[in-house]
Structures are given as structure tokens and as C-alpha cells.
Amino acid sequence: MATGKMLNGRIFDSRIRSRNITGKEKWLGYLLGPCGALLINAVLGGSFLNQYWTDVLKLGGLWGGAFLIVFPIFSKILDAITNFIMGWIIDRTKNKQGKARPYLLLSAFLVPITGMLLYLVPNMSISWKAVWVIISYNLFFSFAYTIYNMSHNMMVPLSTRNSSQRGVLAVFNQVATIMVTGIIAALIFPMVILPMIGSSQTLWISVMSVLCIIMLPVMLLEYYFTKERVTEELGKVETVKIPYKMQIKAVFSDKYIVFLLVYSLIYTLGGTLKNSALIYYCNYVLGTYNDGITQTLISVIGGIPMGIGIFAVWPLAKKFGKKNVTVAGFVFYAVGSAICWMVPTNLIVVIIGQFIKNIGGLPCAYIFMSLFSDSFDHLEWKTGFRSDSLAMSIYSTITIVLMGVGLAILNAALNASGYIPPLNVTDLGEAEAILAQNGWLSQLDLSSYKMAIDGTFTVGIQQPGSTLNAISFLFVGLEVITGILSAILLAFIGVEKTLERKQKIIRERQKEACEKSGKVWVEPEVQLEMDQRLADEEAEEIFRSELKSKCEKKGLNYEEELEKHIRQISEKNAKEAEKKRLAEEKQAAKLKAAEEKQTAKLAKLTSQQLVAREEKARRRRERIDAAWAIELEKGNATYQKMQDLLKKYAEKKEKH
């Protein structure tokens, strides 16, 4: 879907112009910017929404308990369809701002508005409340958040071909997720907000609406401080529209992408059920209803590795490989979950187990998207065209659909095991009367009541043993199984080994296609520098024109003001040059130190050890080269087959 001249104005341009990843891009575009939509989704659309349905709107018993089981699944089927539609739209978008970034701008307004509608349920009959819930839920997830999520997930793969820089952006993106889910959604909200609002619908609506309004400008940061360098690179080469059917065949015939998608399905299911059950686990298995302490302890102490892991996980991945570190991590992941499952009611044991589990989850949390992006380059090398939008559509569909499936499984487990929702009353005597009327008086726990800031009381109920067991399995038991399966699947991913060779071939093909079409090939890095220089010259020309008008209006000396401006630019350029020089010196010193360390290490070896070392390295190179020769032959065959199919498709289209 070409968007023509839409968003061509300078006001819509990215604030990132460098050919390399910049500090502003990392901190504002990939860390702070995503926090807006992620926070809205984590708080408004996660397990808190299910708590709002079951504990505030009291929808758990509707249709004999089937409503909250059936409706999320059917909604996610619609969500899956819109994900594929959105992927198709992004893949066919041609715009000055890129193919995914324009939709970040659109979603910056849609996500907050539809997010508020999730909670703005009018005071009417329970059946009409259910209708409102269905409509608002699908407006948010199947429409607004789908637009954001698809475009957001595309940004790392489209940011650059530099695998190392892409990995850094994936880490920053994941830090944003950890900040939102681990600090705000799982720490501040349950510790401070939930005890204050209890089960009062008015307070829930007020809090969620304010959150949406505040997050809108934060979401705009992701649009303005990101850049699609891969899209710009492909824009220099004439490309053929790839039939969707061919892309589907390419994606599902590639073992790396298939294995990664199956892994994401297994891992996401376990994580979704665990996150959905978190509130119920802390409210009933470990603590009391909305006590503001239990969930905080689980989130803070168990989640400490996720905070400090950013400093360790990428160096380890560089040394041992992304796949190897991730597989090893899932061993710890399964062990930590098993410790929790053995004693699910002991807070100390659970915190220790969660700490170990989260250490194991570090590589997956921070590295997976970079590994997934590598597979897109691999598939482009093998087929001659990119299918990242389709692959990301499938990935996003898996993630989003499993959210609905997870909610359905959780609500089915709660309903089948006899879950009793809390009461919202004006005094505690009213709670006793209601429980006596329903035959639940023996399960009243007045020690767990909380008074909301509007003066009403929220009274938690002691749950049956069957409910506690179901919640414990969903929170800690299931991840033992998913951790083991994930480790097994990822052991087959070897996309990193030959990625640089494949990227070199991709670049050679682009150059050949460009020259064949009669154009002069310019290396993308050089082109970016040229574009940057032209943009700077244009900006300088506009500035001088505006400065002249300003001086005439205010009676200032234009030549003097221009001289000040030129001096400021000169000083700025000098600072940047010095900063670049120091960075180059630091990198050179680092390389020299590494070489000296390696030389010293080799000097300690005997001649026999040196020969053995060289022989081992030689055999390793031979194995890699032999494997690459086989992969190259198969890849070239697939590439030629795909090009023949594209040629036939183009000829057929031309005839019609």
C-alpha cells in the first residue's frame, strides 16, 4: 500500500540521520519510546484487565462461566487475522518515512484512546457490559495495538544490517519491556495503586484514563527517534512485488524461522499463563488480597537478574554465540521454575527459584529478537527477497493469540476450580451477609480487607484448595516444561555461523541489480553520508533565511548573528571530531590490549601445544567451510528456483 506524499513534510521526518546507531536512537527510540504503548498494554491489557473483569465487573459467572473463556479466544482469532492484514499493509507501504514507522505515528493516538475504552464501561446490565467489553477489547487489541505491535516489532530488523548494532537495539527494546512489566506493572502498580483503588470501578476508570493520556507523548518518541536503514537501502534497488503465497512458502520452508516460531509459541504460552496468574498467585497462594507487598517482593527480588543482566548477557553472547547462551539459559530457567513448583507456598523458596529462573531467562529476553532478525537476512539470502513482514506477522499473531488463549485457560481453571471473587462493600457487616447468603461464610477472611480511597471496602476470600493448586501450576509448574522444550528447539538454530558471508552476497546481488538497471551503484553507507550532507545543507539554507527575516523584524545585525551561528557550528563540529577521535583511540587501545594479551598467552605455550592449537583451528575452519559449501549449494539452488518463479510471475502479470 503506497502512501504517496503523505508524511512528506519535514515535521514528520525522523530526528535520526546517522548511518550508524546513535545514542539518541537507543535511549529515546528503543528504550523510552516503546515504554508508552508497552505500559498501556501491560497495565490496561494484561492480567489487571482480567482482574477488572472478574473482581470489579463480576463477569466471571456470565454464561455459566463460559463468557470469559470463549470471548477471549474468538477475539484473538480476529486479532490473528488483523495481524496478517497489517503485515501485508506494512510490506506494501512505500513512504519517505519508511514502511513501518508511519504506523507508529498512527498508533500513538489510537492506542491511548482505545485503551481508555477498555475500562470506561457504563453502569448498565451485565449483558450490555459484556457487549461493551467485547467491542472495546477488539478495538484495542485487534485494531489499535495490532497496528502498533506490528510496526514496533519491525523496527529492530529494519534498523540496520549490522548484526552487532541490531543486537544492541534488541537489548534496549527488551530493557523497555523489563522496565514496564518488571518495575511499573509488576511493582509500582500492585504496591501503590491497587491497594488504593480496591475494586471500585470509578477509581479504576480514573487511574487508567490518566495513564493513557500521559503515555501519548511518550509513544511519539519511538516514531521520531527511529530509522529504517534497511528499507532505505532496498529503496535504491528496483524490486519486484513478491506474491504473498510465495512469501508464505519461503517462510514455512525455512528450518530456522520455523524452529524459532515454534519456540516462540511454546515460550509465550508458558509466559502468558504465568503472567496472567501472577496477581491471583500473590493474592491467594503466597499473600493476601492486594496486600501491596507479596507481588512487590516476587517482582523485585526475583526480577533483579533482569535488571543487572543487560551488562552481562551481550558480552557472553558475543563470546559464546547467541544460540549457545540462550540454550544454557533455559536450563537454569527450568531448574528455577522446578524449585518454585516443589514448594509453591513458601515465599522464600519461591523468591530463590524465581531469581534462578530469571537468570536463565536473560538471554531469551535480551537476545531473541536479534537472533530472529538474523534469520530474516538468512532467508533473504536464500530467496532473494525479504519476508520479514510476514514472519513478524506470524510471530506477533502467536504472541497475541496466546494472550487470549492464556486468559481463556486461566479463567477456565478459576471457574472449574471454584474461584470466589472478592467483595466491594460499604461496611464489613455487608460482606458477612453476602457470604452467608451464598454459603461462603466459612471462607471470609476479614484480615485481608482493604479500604479504597473512596471509603469502600474490598474483602478478599479464602480460595478452595483446588483453586490454589490450579493457580500454582499455571504460575510456576508450566514453565518447567516450556523451559526444557525451548532449550531443545533452540539447539537446532545455527543461523549465526555464516551470517556475514550471506550479508556480503546480498550486497553483491544488490549492486549487480542496480548496475543492470543502468544506475550507478553507491554503497548504502556512502549514500547515507551524502543524504546527511544534503539534509544539513538544506537545513542550513532554511536557517539562514529564517535568521535573516528574524534580524529584519527585530532590528538585529544579520552578519553578526550569522557569524555567531557559524562559530557555534564550528565549535560543535570540533567537539564531535574530538569525540570521534577519542572513541577511535579507545577502540584502537582495546584492540591492541587484546592482541598483546593473546601474544602473551601464546608465548607461554610450547611448540607442540602451538602446533596442536593450529591443527585444531585448521580442522574447525575446514568443518565450517565444508558446512558452508553444502549450505551455499542448497541456498543457490533455492535462490535460482525462487528467481525463476518470480520471472514467470512477472511475465504472467505483464501479459494480463
Image (cartoon, grey):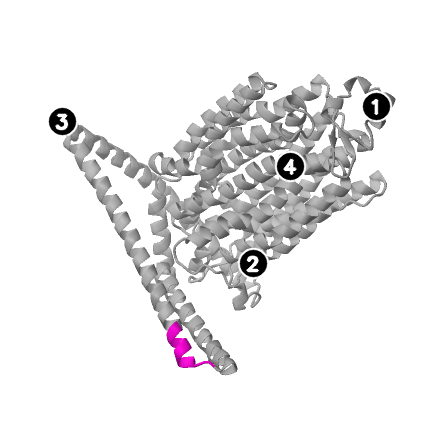
Cα–Cα gap, marks 4 and 1: 27 Å
| Label 4 close to label 2 by CB (< 8 Å) | no
Mark 1 against mark 3, which lies toward the viewer? 1
Mark 4 lies on residue: 192
Distance of label 1 from label 3 (alpha carbons): 85 Å
Q: Quadrant of the C terminus?
A: bottom right
| Residue at 76 percent of width and 23 percent of height | 446
Q: Quadrant of the N terminus?
A: bottom right
Secondary structure character of the magenta stretch overall: helix
Residue drawn at (41%, 68%) of the image: 536
Q: Is residue 559 magenta?
A: yes
Q: Which residues are magenta?
A: 556-564
Is the residue 391 above or below the residue 66 in the image?
A: below
According to the picture, the residue beneath numbered tag 3 turns out to be: 608
From the image, tell me which residue sits under label 2: 102
Q: Percent position (x, y) of residue 287? A: 65, 24
* Element type where label 1 sits in the image: helix
For disc 1, the neighbor class at 10 Å (few under 14, some 14 to 19, many from 20) is some
